[in-house]
Amino acid sequence: MAMIVVECPDCGRVLMRLAPIGGTNQTKTCSGCKNHFRVIKDARTGNVTVQRD
């Protein structure tokens, strides 16, 4: 199964990998720039949003 790769909008490092099905709402810290981001994936549409936390 292919995974959705979510990258840091500031430095481009990988924040997390998500399954293509289901939704999520998690807070992640980038290992490169140490900024905090909220990763939101809508279960119905599959859209992934990365917001600064």
Image (cartoon, rainbow, N blue to C red):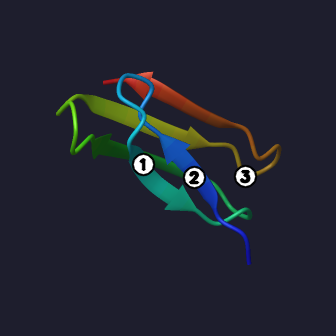
Q: Quadrant of residue 42?
A: top right
* Disc number for residue 51: none
Secondary structure at numbered mark 3: loop
Q: Nearer the viewer, mark 3 or mark 2?
A: 2
Q: Which residue is mark 1?
A: 14
> Would you say 11 lies left or right of 35 here?
right
Q: Residue at x 27, y 40 (%)?
A: 30
Q: Which residue is mark 2?
A: 5
Query: Closer to the camera, 50 or 3?
Result: 3
Disc 3 from disc 2: Cα separation = 16 Å
Q: Is residue 18 above or below residue 13?
A: below
Tell which circle, 2 or 1, labels the residue nearer the N-terminal end. 2
Tell which circle, 3 or 2, labels the residue nearer the N-terminal end. 2
Secondary structure at numbered mark 1: strand
Amino acid type shown at disc 2: Val
Q: Position of residue 27 (x, y in %)?
A: 33, 42
Q: Which residue is mark 3?
A: 43
Disc 2 from disc 1: Cα separation = 7 Å
Q: Residue at x 39, y 47 (%)?
A: 15
Query: Closer to the camera, 35 or 25?
Result: 35
